[in-house]
């Protein structure tokens, strides 16, 4: 994987994206040449239209990232990838034509855009058929040797067998005399020279997956392997990198303290984040004000009670604050106390079902962002009644409150909606990853991916 601004991106995605950009430039240029030949004009030099080609490629790439073209599902399903490509390219062209019409520039001809759309779809689909098939081969994955043969090693085996996995396990070494869970593992005593064994297998990374490290850490072996240039990683760091979450089953306080992350040098990033929140929330409220008022009226007509409701949530450093949302449930929804939302929740009103699926009920929360109580990106703020219970049952739950809560977040784009302790545990793993690896780049990635969640109603309940 490539680490970009503290966030890991698979090599396959980097290569696929780079080829996509080149193909978008090519499709845009060929569409211009085709249209020029049809009307009998000279196409001119590429330099003369370089900024139009760059705008087309950039906007389309952003749309592709936003709708999940480079997600795990799209990488392993051609049908899924093609559907997302159609949506992404259509959105990109609509955006370009709209902006061009608004500023009155006439820089993007509709006929040229139509040709570019058709050419891009064909080229990008072919890219996935040819290059995507090659990237799926084990030869293009990192070769990993696992030191361990217990439950952790078995988890790594299962992770490597996922179609979108970026690594292949070339062997397991049982480091203790305990009965191995991985049956095809090799006993450490059967290997005369572990460093030579690593070299013979062509290993690029060794992962330490011992169940118990006390008095069992093979320091001499790890040191020799490390000095030969092979990357050595521990289980928790490897899982974090490969899955984008902090594994609560294996992390401990010392790992969180000494591992890379939770950087204090965030003054500039925090200031930029706040400026963005102010500008974006003010613009969002201005643009969606009529929509909010319209649905506020529909909520009033649909059921008795106020159009909006306030609810106390836990924010930065555990401080409570009130969020404002359009009411989507009956006014007696919590007559018996606070409850988790559930699938097909009978408390949800008719109009409430629609505004929940489309996330329209979330729009008034931009006011909390403008006031500085929330951010656009961050862990979703939870209710105090649930927080008290979750902090007792889940380790490190309080650490998610060390960053400002958000309307959307890393957990929301990676994990479907859940309303249970187990779901909260999974979401906490993603929230801790965000808190540990926060950068403006990760915020941008989350904002773009949120469009995918909204368009396909992923996680809505």
Image (cartoon, rainbow, N blue to C red):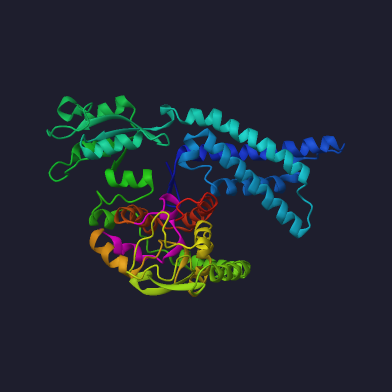
The image quadrant where one finds the N terminus is: top left
Side of 43 relative to 423 (left or right): right
Which residue is rendered at x = 68% and y = 47% of the image?
93
Q: Is 161 situated above or below 71?
A: above
Q: Is 201 situated above or below 72?
A: above
Which residue is rendered at x = 58% and y = 71% of the image?
297
The image quadrant where one finds the C terminus is: bottom left
Q: Nearer the viewer, residue 387 or 254?
A: 387
Which residue is rendered at x = 34% and y = 67% of the image?
338
Occupied quadrant, residue 228: top left
Residue 52 coordinates in the image, percent (x, y):
72, 47
Q: Is residue 340 magenta?
A: no
Side of 42 relative to 30 (left or right): right
Q: Which residues are magenta?
A: 395-419
Q: Nearer the viewer, residue 240 or 219?
A: 240
Residue 314 coordinates in the image, percent (x, y):
36, 70
Q: Nearer the viewer, residue 63 or 308?
A: 308
């Amino acid at each position: 994987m490539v680490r970009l601004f503290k966030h890991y991106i698979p090599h396959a995605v980097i290569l696929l994206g780079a080829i996509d950009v080149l193909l978008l430039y090519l499709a845009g240029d060929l569409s211009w040449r085709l249209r020029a030949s049809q009307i009998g004009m000279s196409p001119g030099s590429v330099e003369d239209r370089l900024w139009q080609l760059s705008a087309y490629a950039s906007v389309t790439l952003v749309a592709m990232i936003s709708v999940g073209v480079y997600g795990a599902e799209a990488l392993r399903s051609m049908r899924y990838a093609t559907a997302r490509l159609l949506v992404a390219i259509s959105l990109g062209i609509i955006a370009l034509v709209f902006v061009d019409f608004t500023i009155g520039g006439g820089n993007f001809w509709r006929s040229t855009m139509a040709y570019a759309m058709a050419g891009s779809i064909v080229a990008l689909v072919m890219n996935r058929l040819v290059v995507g098939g090659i990237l799926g081969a084990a030869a293009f994955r990192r070769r990993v040797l696992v030191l361990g043969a217990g439950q952790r090693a078995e988890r790594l085996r299962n992770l490597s067998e996922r179609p979108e996995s970026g690594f292949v396990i070339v062997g397991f070494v049982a480091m203790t005399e305990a009965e191995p869970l991985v049956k095809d593992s090799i006993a450490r005593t059967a290997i005369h020279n572990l460093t030579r064994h690593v070299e013979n297998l062509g290993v690029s990374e060794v992962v330490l997956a011992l169940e118990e490290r006390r008095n069992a850490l093979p320091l001499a072996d790890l040191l020799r392997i490390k000095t030969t240039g092979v990357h050595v990683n521990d289980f928790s760091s490897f899982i974090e990198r490969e899955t984008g979450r902090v594994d609560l089953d294996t992390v401990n306080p010392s790992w969180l303290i000494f591992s890379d992350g939770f950087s204090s040098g965030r003054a500039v990033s925090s200031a930029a984040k706040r400026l963005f929140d102010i500008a974006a929330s003010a613009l969002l409220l201005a643009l969606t004000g009529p929509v909010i008022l319209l649905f506020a009226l529909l909520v009033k007509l649909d059921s008795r009670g106020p159009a909006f409701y306030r609810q106390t949530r836990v924010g930065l450093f555990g401080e409570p604050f009130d969020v404002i949302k359009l009411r989507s449930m009956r006014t007696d929804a919590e007559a018996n106390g606070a409850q988790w939302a559930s699938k097909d929740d009978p408390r949800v009103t008719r109009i409430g079902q629609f505004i929940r699926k489309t996330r329209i009920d979330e729009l008034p929360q931009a006011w909390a962002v403008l006031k500085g109580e929330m951010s656009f990106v961050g862990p979703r703020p939870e209710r105090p009644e649930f927080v008290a219970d979750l902090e007792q049952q889940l380790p490190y739950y309080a650490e998610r409150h060390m960053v400002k809560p958000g309307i959307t977040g890393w957990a929301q784009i990676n994990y479907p909606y859940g309303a249970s302790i187990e779901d909260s545990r999974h979401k906490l793993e993603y929230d801790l990853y965000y808190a540990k690896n926060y950068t403006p780049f990760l915020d941008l990635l989350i904002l773009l991916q949120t469009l995918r969640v909204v368009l396909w109603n992923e996680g809505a309940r």
